[in-house]
Image: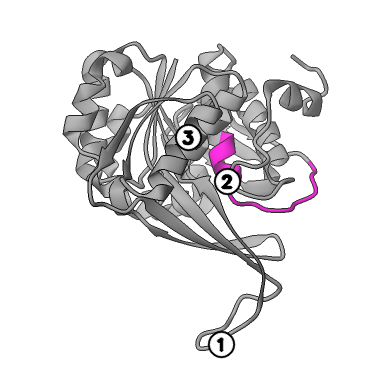
Amino acid sequence: MITIVGSVNMDLVVQTADFPKQGETTMGELFTTVPGGKGANQAVAAARLGGDVHIVANVGDDLFGKELVENLRANSVNSEGVSVSEGAASGIANILLSDGDNRIIVVPGANYQLTATEIDLMTKKIEKSDLVVLQLEIPIPTIKHTLELCAELDVPVLMNPAPAGGFQKEFLQYVKYLTPNETECEQIFGTDMETALENHPNQLIVTLGSAGARFYDGEKHVIVEGFKTEVVDTTGAGDTFNGALAYALVEGFGLGEAVKFGNAAGSLAVEEFGAQGGMPSREDVERRLGGER
């Protein structure tokens, strides 16, 4: 069982041919609302693959909150750990898309009302988990409390340290797997990627976008190549990788195999619109892997 502790947002997506410059107005081509949030995205990614996934999160008592919970349930994510804050707005992400790239502004809303109290109410669920997955779009004190609780219960943690500005070095002692991208890695460790990897063997996994991901196994650097794909929308690709990585690790894959599985899932996710739109099934991933498993 995988328990995700994290954010749930409604993504407000605008697609345009050109990103506007400062003070400039440009015409958009598309506007839509789609469920997102790093926590929800990773939960849906793991559940689509067939995982037993539970989420601990917080939404507002608005229309977005109801839609977000319904979407989790529709994707087979157990949502009994989702609390509702009265009078609060659900979190949103304003996403601007252009030519396969994106720019994102997150307004946390009710996500920042997820407290240690809600985490403690889910202690029994966390204790039964094979893996807990965290990101950094909820309050830092809540993250700290969750990490300490997982350590007390001897439950391993996978942390996707995004946005990286919220990461604290003390988190490392509680985390079994840390999955920044290359920019986040340099921001967190203040050194080059190779040195950071060598200092954290089999713990630090750096994602490299279309180039795949890499880690250090204690003896050598392991580069796990990505997959060629036709990019439609990169939003949620990293979340798909993390959800798939978590699923594969719980399924008993070795680290290299799990990273390759995550790369394949992420490559499929970018072929459809929306953070969750292209998240694949296990059968989809196995086809991309060429039936290797």
Nearer to us: label 1 or label 3: 3
* Closer-to-camera residue (82/140): 82
- Magenta-drawn segment: 228-241
Report if residue 135 is visible in the image.
yes
CA distance for labels 2 and 1:
27 Å
Quick check: 139 left or right of 237?
left
CA distance for labels 2 and 3:
19 Å
Nearer to us: label 2 or label 3: 3
Image spot of residue 129 (x, y percent) = 38, 15
* Residue 26 covered by magenta stretch: no
**Tag 1's secondary structure?**
loop
Q: Main SS type for the magenta part?
A: loop
Quick check: 159 left or right of 42?
left
* Closer-to-camera residue (250/8): 8
Please state the total of marks drawn on the protein image. Answer: 3
Residue 236 is marked as 2
* Residue drawn at the location 71% of the way across and 73% of the way down: 17
* Residue drawn at the location 70% of the way across and 33% of the way down: 264
In the orientation shown, which residue stands out farthest toward the front?
63
**Lower sequence index among marks 2 and 1:** 1
The residue singled out by tag 1 in the image is 24
Q: Are marks 1 and 3 in contact (CB under 8 Å)?
A: no
The residue singled out by tag 3 in the image is 70
* Residue drawn at the location 72% of the way across and 26% of the way down: 285
Report if residue 216 is visible in the image.
no
